[in-house]
């Protein structure tokens, strides 16, 4: 398989071809993504909730992101790898952001880093890009600011919010971000931003007119039975399938039906 590069992603936008992205955290799911020809894998800090069982993304550390990103890179050596910068790894100062993003690029094989925020991170984005680090922005509902929002919400329904989002989008574009994730944004606003700019837009809860779509692997395959945001489409009932398999294993062991002779080593 030919590797997916930033050039290839930009070409896709130019040609009007949709971009596929999966947020995931481990070797085997990344390998599945590569095997079916997904364009990009994002090591999202959603791993705090989805993988670690925490309540928000805020607790995730830089070392944890690097650990997971290395595993994902091994599973998907040819996909465009983006790594989320965790809370407070890029907000304190431009210098610290450069150091931490540099570490991610050097140690994981990532091709880009993703940062949440708009105007307030513009200088950081500019310095990263001028240092050779491609930057993905993240606007709309930004989970690292969950306590500021007071919980998940759609951003951009109100006129003032929409204007702020448009301004942040323009600022990130001017600072050099080549891609922006739009999370929980009304579809008309996401469509306008997508059609009026060269920046690649990736939607999650932002309608179908974005240049591409991202979903969390575990949501897409239905591993969480009790969690289904409006924007998730479940392509499998993973939890049901796995529970059936586990139940069969339990019954077989308890009945003495597993392992069989064929599944055992002879003398
Ligand atoms: O953390 C994450 O997985 C993300 C995507 C959902 C966009 O930021």
Image (tube, helix red, strand yellow):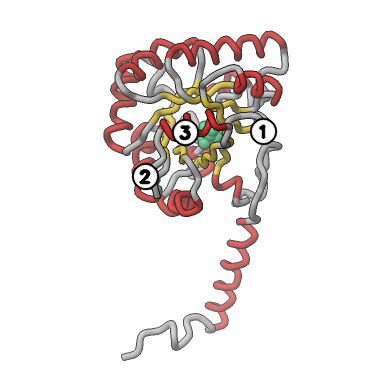
Kindly identify the residue that appears in the image at 59 percent across and 73 percent down. 248
Which x, y percent locates residue 2? 39, 46
Mark 3 = which residue? 9
Q: Residue furthest bottom?
A: 267
The correct choice, above or below, for 189 with respect to 70 in the image is above
In 3D space, how far apart are the residues under numbered discs 1 and 2 (Cα atoms)?
A: 28 Å
Instruction: Check whether the beta carbons of the residues at disc 1 and disc 2 lie within 8 A of each other.
Output: no
Q: Between residues 210 and 10, which one lies in front from this camera angle? A: 10
Which x, y percent locates residue 176? 42, 16
Is any atom of residue 160 visible in this view?
yes
> Number of callouts in the render?
3
Q: Point out the tag, 1 or 2, that comes first from the N-terminus.
A: 2
- Would you identify the image quadrant in which residue 69 lies? top left
Q: Point out the tag, 3 or 2, that comes first from the N-terminus.
A: 3
Q: Label 3 neighbourhood size at 10 Å, few (<14), some (14-19), many (20+)?
A: many
Which x, y percent locates residue 249? 55, 72
Q: Quadrant of the C terminus?
A: bottom left
Q: Which of the labelled discs sits on residue 59, or is there none? A: none
Q: Label 1 neighbourhood size at 10 Å, few (<14), some (14-19), many (20+)?
A: some
Is any atom of residue 143 visible in this view?
no
Mark in front: 1 vs 2: 1
In 3D space, how far apart are the residues under numbered discs 3 and 2 (Cα atoms)?
A: 18 Å
Q: Which of the labelled discs sits on residue 208, or is there none? A: 1
Mark 2 = which residue? 73
Which x, y percent locates residue 139? 56, 21
From the viewer's perspective, tell me whether residue 48 is left or right of residue 17.
Answer: left
From the viewer's perspective, tell me whether residue 159 is left or right of residue 105.
Answer: right
Kindly identify the residue that appears in the image at 35 percent across and 37 percent down. 66
């Amino acid at each position: 398989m030919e590797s997916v590069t930033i050039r290839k992603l930009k070409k896709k936008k130019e040609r009007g071809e949709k971009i596929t992205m999966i947020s995931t955290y481990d070797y085997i799911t990344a390998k599945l993504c590569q095997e079916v020809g997904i364009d990009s894998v994002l090591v999202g800090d959603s791993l705090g909730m989805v993988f670690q069982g925490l309540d928000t993304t805020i607790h995730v550390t830089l070392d944890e992101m690097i650990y997971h990103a290395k595993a994902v890179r091994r599973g998907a050596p040819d996909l465009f790898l983006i790594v989320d910068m965790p809370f407070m790894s890029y907000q304190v100062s431009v210098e610290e952001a450069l150091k931490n993003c540099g570490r991610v690029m050097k140690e994981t094989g990532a091709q880009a880093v993703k940062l949440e925020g708009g105007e307030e991170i513009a200088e950081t984005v500019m310095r990263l890009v001028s240092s050779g680090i491609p930057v993905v922005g993240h606007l709309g509902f930004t989970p690292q600011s969950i306590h500021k929002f007071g919980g998940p919400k759609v951003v951009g329904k109100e006129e003032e919010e929409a204007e702020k989002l448009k301004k942040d989008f323009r600022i990130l574009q001017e600072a050099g971000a080549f891609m922006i994730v739009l999370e929980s944004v009304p579809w008309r606003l996401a469509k306008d931003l997508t059609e009026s700019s060269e920046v690649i837009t990736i939607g999650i809860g932002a309608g179908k007119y974005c240049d591409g779509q991202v979903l969390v692997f575990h949501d897409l395959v239905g591993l969480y039975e009790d969690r289904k945001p409006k924007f998730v489409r479940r392509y499998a009932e993973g939890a049901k399938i796995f529970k059936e398999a586990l139940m069969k294993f339990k019954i077989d062991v308890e009945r003495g039906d597993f392992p069989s002779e064929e599944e055992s080593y002879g003398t």
